[in-house]
Amino acid sequence: MQQHTSRMQDCIQECISCHRICLETLTHCLSKGGRHAEAHHIRLLTDCAEICQTSANFMLRNSELHVHTCGACAEICERCARSCEEMSDDDLMARCAEACRSCSEICREMSRVGERAA
């Protein structure tokens, strides 16, 4: 079984962190209501949390298919970040956007690793 690279370990941690903050933000948004609880935004937070968890799991078990989940994760995290930034006057929303952007960047990097290997 191959070892996780340092960058893959970083990506796993970013995915786990993003998963956690998206769930925390989801709960916050539902309790806050209004535009925070709009269906589109709640779906993005849910999608982001789930794809982050899935991507972390793929990398943890050394699946060579992690490049695909990481590619999807990068796209979904980017969309979630944009949605959260629309409400960045709220501290938790700003932190969620930042975590999503960070996760998107490293997941995009991980997805390109597979392109080079192909």
Image: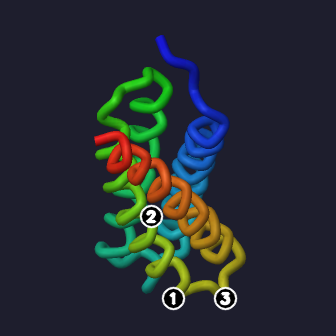
Q: Nearer the N terminus, badge 1 or badge 2? A: 2
| Residue for point 44% across, 21% down | 61
Residue 15 placement, left or right of 69: right
Taking depth in this image into account, of 27 and 68 the one nearest to the observer is: 68
Position above or below: 83 against 73: below
User: How busy is the neighbourhood of tag 2: few (under 14 within 10 Å), some, or many (20 plus)?
Assistant: many
**Disc 1 marks which residue?**
86
**Disc 3 marks which residue?**
89
Q: Which callout, 1 or 2, points to the residue nearer the camera?
A: 2
Q: Nearer the N terminus, badge 2 or badge 3? A: 2
Taking depth in this image into account, of 38 and 83 the one nearest to the observer is: 83
Determine the image quadrant of residue 69: top left
| Residue for point 44% across, 71% down | 78
User: How busy is the neighbourhood of tag 1: few (under 14 within 10 Å), some, or many (20 plus)?
Assistant: some
Distance from Cα at disc 1 to Cα at disc 2? 14 Å
**Residue 25 locus on image (x, y percent):** 56, 63
Q: Amino acid at mark 1?
A: Glu
**Residue 112 locus on image (x, y percent):** 40, 53
**Disc 2 marks which residue?**
77
Distance from Cα at disc 2 to Cα at disc 3? 19 Å
Q: Amino acid at mark 3?
A: Asp
| Residue for point 37% across, 48% down | 116
Q: Amino acid at mark 2?
A: Cys
Taking depth in this image into account, of 25 and 33 the one nearest to the observer is: 25
Do labels 1 and 2 touch, CB within 8 Å? no
Q: Which callout, 2 or 3, points to the residue nearer the camera?
A: 2
